[in-house]
Image: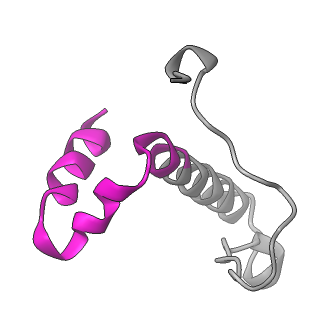
Amino acid sequence: MSLHKELTQIKHQPETSWLLEVSSYVVREAMADLGNAYKHFFRRIKEGLRGKAAGEPQFRSRQEPSGRGFRIGPPQAIEVR
């Protein structure tokens, strides 16, 4: 939760105000995905894996869609007008 509070403050700074243009769920899911990627990476490091075997998180190209699509928060958070 503290990261979400910090993110809210970051959104209101001039250089990152573009974050206000996208749904907060998109940003939260991206943060959760990044957190999970590093959690698994550090778990593999503890297991003794190194280099490529440890699977350092990789940023994906915008030119090559990953095919995963996207997620939106819980269904009750969606409002159709």
Q: Check residue 47 for magenta coloring.
A: no
Query: Looking at the picture, how far across and down is residue 71, in whole percent?
Result: 68, 42
Query: Looking at the picture, how far across and down is residue 12, in whole percent?
Result: 14, 57
Extent of the magenta region: 1-29
Q: Left or right of 40: which side holds 73?
A: left
Q: How many marks?
A: 0
Q: Residue at x 76, y 71 (%)?
A: 54
Q: Left or right of 73: which side holds 23?
A: left
Most common SS among magenta residues: helix
Q: Is residue 33 above or below residue 65?
A: above
Q: Left or right of 24: which side holds 62?
A: right
Quadrant where the N terminus is found in the figure: top left
The image quarter containing residue 76 is top right
Q: Residue at x 68, y 80 (%)?
A: 62
Q: Is residue 61 above or below residue 29?
A: below
Q: Residue furthest right?
A: 67
Q: Residue at x 51, y 23 (%)?
A: 81
Foreground of the two, 63 or 53:
63
Foreground of the two, 3 or 40:
3
The image quarter containing residue 64 is bottom right
